[in-house]
Amino acid sequence: MSLHLEARVSDPTAGGLENLLSEDRRFPPSAEFAAQANASADLYSWANADRPAFWGEQARELLTWSTPFEQTLDWSDAPVARWFADGRLNAAYNAVDRHVEAGRGDKVALHFEGEGGDTRTLTYADLQREVSRAANALTSLGVTTGDRVAVYLPMIPEAVVTMLACARIGAPHSVVFGGFSAEALHSRILDAEAKLVVTADGGFRRGAASALKPAVDEALAKGAPSVEHVLVVKRTGQPVEWTEGRDVWWSDVVDTASDEHTPVDVEAEHPLFILYTSGTTGKPKGIFHTTGGYLAQAAYTHLNVFDLKAETDVYWCTADVGWITGHTYVVYGPLVNGATQVIYEGTPDTPHRGRWWEIVQKYGVTILYTAPTAIRTCMKWGEEIPAQFDLSSLRVLGSVGEPINPEAWMWYRRVVGGDRAPIVDTWWQTETGAIMISPLPGVTETKPGSAQVPLPGIAADVVDDEAHSVPDGSGGYLVLTEPWPAMLRGIWGDRQRYVDTYWSRFRGLYFAGDGAKKDEDGDIWLLGRVDDVMNVSGHRLSTTEIESALVSHPWVAEAAVVGAADETTGQAVVAFVILRGDSEAGDLPAQDVQTTLRNHVAKEIGPIAKPRQVLVVAELPKTRSGKIMRRLLRDVAENRQVGDATTLADSSVMDLIAQGLSTPA
Ligand code: 6R9
């Protein structure tokens, strides 16, 4: 076993995190890949020489401006940045029209695959017509530049079309996950004072029609004075309640609208969208992004991190448009770069567990961007499933959303990437807008489990409690030390909360909320949210390290670790594991499985990290974006009533876990 983990004991007040995770496997880029790569090592020195000028070059090169900018960064109102502020542009024009004008109208923009197997192909010319119709329809419904539009749709082409139609008229969109409750939708509509809600009768998930419109009706029944209309896409054909005068069918107003529309030029700093993300407490934060800087970094990162060749690649990001990855790497990045991409409505196991690989084979997907949780789920299902499909088209693999365990990384590389495709582990946040820390394919020698290096143009560091940069080999808190183009411009309507949340922990530094360490080479390893860091007998332990240790055991497919209150040790480690379907553990007594896994962690990390309990479960509670909701597991581990589970992708999971635990292990 080449994965070696060690936990160093530290005084929690003295020097930040000191959990070390040393992983000695290395994957240098192949000569063939490097020879054709978009990125080169020169980018780092170029960007370091003059960061704002570097970004100015990217913004000029990758975007089309109706009024070119002279200014690059204006940081005089810190911590609110202004980038390219005297320039003007339109995001939808950049994502669609300019490709048509350049003679690429017949190029496929979207290969849509419905869960039930229905498909639609939209070229850039089709997209231009659709987005123009939708922009005209929005205008006819009274939406004008600056008005907010709430979008509550499944992963269907209309979601992309709606977002671009909003951008086309300069109306910031606020996309709310289709999996969120009426309550969550209501609070987001109120906070943004949305004038219009765009939704569908429903979408297809797990082989069934899942209704969306009732949640909108329920949200609006709670009172939402700003909303004038609800625009409804017919997707499933299920019956819907109808409020005359308020509700309108997409087919009545969009399909009949003119397919010609002139995009509205906006200032670079005009808000492009609001996206709500849950804070640790209280109401969700409306993170808002503006147009020019966001688009520049979206395009630059999409081009270089995924090595996109717009003419030949078929790109697929599996994220839902309801989270930031769907905004930046389904809608804006790929379309601004003129890529051909796949979007898929459903779940990876409908109607069978090979569905994703079938899609890769069918469309010849060359670049795949997904989340560690999905990779671990596929590991759980067994590698014989992807083995049934031709995945040889894949040439770049991306990971996002949480730290990827080295074992999952290795599986991804070997089983999905044929030991050939480079993996880019991309660290970023809703707040950062675009990728910040990632290897560059063809340039960086990769390390399983590490996001490694800030991209050219990005400045990050790991600091201790006193904001001092830690030496290589030590841990601490991840911070961003220089403004970047796609950074959030604030929390909608609450500047003070923006300052308090991100800029007050360390003076002058953006605090991301993640623990991290620098290895001996200075490469960055993410250790999970700092609120996921446990303190056991005064020793700081990272949930990620213990999860990695568990997943490195051949029996374990997926693991989630929480710190549960403990009388003697302060906190104790409680692990929830999903066993691999094909492992022999299924035939052993639960007690033996527990003991083996507890000892395994003790051996990998040290006795201090040995879980008090290892609970075998069938599922883990996850948000729609795939993040494990450790808060709920902590409730289980501490024998409390389980708290608010409304943001779970599948709310029955907690019942399953509770049932499983009531049968004694
Ligand atoms: C893009 C996205 C942000 C948080 C972030 C961190 C975690 C994301 C990661 C990662 C380790 C990676 N995270 N990517 N941790 N390695 N490659 O996920 O945005 O939903 O706002 O979450 O996700 O904890 O702070 P968002």
Image: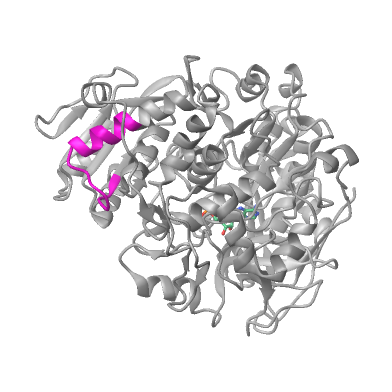
> Image quarter for residue 540?
bottom right
Q: Is residue 84 left or right of residue 35?
A: left
> Image quarter for residue 569?
bottom right
Which quarter of the frame holds ligand 1? bottom right
- Is 177 inside the magenta-drawn segment? no
Residue found at x 51% / y 55%: 433
Q: Is residue 293 left or right of residue 302?
A: left
Residue 124 position (above or below residue 230): above
Residue 137: image x %, image y %? 24, 32
Q: Colour scheme used in the picture?
A: one colour
Camera-nearest residue between 583 and 332? 332
Residue found at x 77% / y 46%: 441
Of all residues, the one furthest to the left in this rendering is 245
Camera-nearest residue between 322 and 253? 253
Range covered by the magenta-colored residues: 132-149
Number of numbered markers: 0
Q: Is residue 291 visible?
A: yes
Q: Is residue 571 visible?
A: no
Residue found at x 90% / y 41%: 31
Q: Is residue 562 left or right of residue 267?
A: right
Residue 83 position (above or below residue 474): above
Residue 613: image x %, image y %? 65, 54
Residue 1: image x %, image y %? 90, 48
Camera-nearest residue between 2 and 288? 288
Query: What quarter of the picture does the C terminus occupy?
Result: top right
Camera-nearest residue between 28 and 202? 28
Residue 35: image x %, image y %? 85, 41
Residue 82 position (above or below residue 87): below
